[in-house]
Image: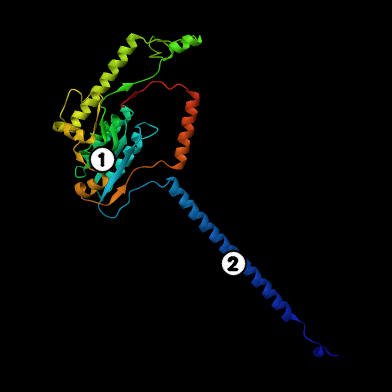
Amino acid sequence: MSDQDKPAPANWERSVLEKLALSAIQEQRRSRHWSILFKTLGFLYLFIVLFLAAGWFGSDGVSIKEHTALVDLQGVIASDQASADSVIGSLQGAFEDKKTKGVILRINSPGGSPVQAGQIYDEIRRLRALHPKIPLYAVVDDICASGGYYVAVGADKIFVDKASIVGSIGVLMDGFGFTQTMQKLGVERRLLTAGENKGFLDPFSPVDPKQAAFAKQMLEEIHGQFIGVVREGRGKRLQETPEMFSGLVWSGEKSIQLGLADALGNVESVARDVIKAEDIVDYTQREGLAARLASRLGASVGKALMPFEQAGVRLR
């Protein structure tokens, strides 16, 4: 049999098999690519949801039209709670937005550090002078006492609820004395200092009259600063009485009569009726999850290393 009469090799079978194999491989690659894409999108979606829920994306207060800017001051005014840094940063963001028509500082605070409150007050005065066309109003929720009121008097006006608690214009330094307990337990205090006042008001030692008098003088000085700020902020609206600077508190309704506040109102009514901008944008800087965890860890370590907190001066 000649070569021409021999049957042709079955190349077409091999070709078909190769095409089928190549098609299968390509299909697997496409499936894998789609799987990776969907997994990536799903992970990205969960990532964004987690960040939003944790507060890691701060409120930048973005708005395309005129609005009322809102800043919250909630809780004790202190470096690790309602700190001057966070409130000041929030206020700066609110004033710097060109679409801000007015700013509301919503306060719900029993007071706290005179230093932190003073820093916020000073920044309010600076921002009001820098942006004279943007008014700032303080709106009180449940309580605006002591350091909280120190901050509030920097506003153009103070709005309250009739049942709000307002005032407590005073300064305190508190602590505990354990001398009698130590005597009963038979515990001896051994305190060595270089400097006769280094153990100032030590809670495990009897009260030194000279140190107590010095502390009282210091409190009176800070109290005088507080009174000066109230008089400066409220001006002729203030109806002074002998009890006004004694540390007493009043209802929101009574505080209006005394000139400590101006009128009844809440965030919505002030935005709508006073600022004339119903859209409210929150500029409050919220602490993210990571910062909260770090702060709590630091606080826990601090408490473990310092079981007895020293007495501090507070506007409360």
Looking at the image, which residue sits at the far right?
1
Residue 113 occupies which quadrant of the picture?
top left
Query: What amino acid is found at the position of numbered circle 1 in the picture?
Result: Val
Residue occupying the point 49% across, 30% down: 300
Mark 2 highlights which residue? 30
Residue 165, x across and y down, in percent: 27, 33
Query: What amino acid is found at the position of numbered circle 2 in the picture?
Result: Arg
Residue 269, x across and y down, in percent: 23, 47
Q: Is residue 277 left or right of residue 2?
A: left
Residue 70, x across and y down, in percent: 29, 45
Looking at the image, which residue sits at the far left?
236
Residue 156 occupies which quadrant of the picture?
top left
The one nearer the camera, 19 or 188, is 188
Give above or below for 132 relative to 193. below
Mark 1 highlights which residue? 139
* Neighbours of disc 1 within 10 Å: few (<14), some (14-19), many (20+): many
Name which of mark 2 and mark 1 comes first in the sequence: 2
Residue 275, x across and y down, in percent: 21, 47
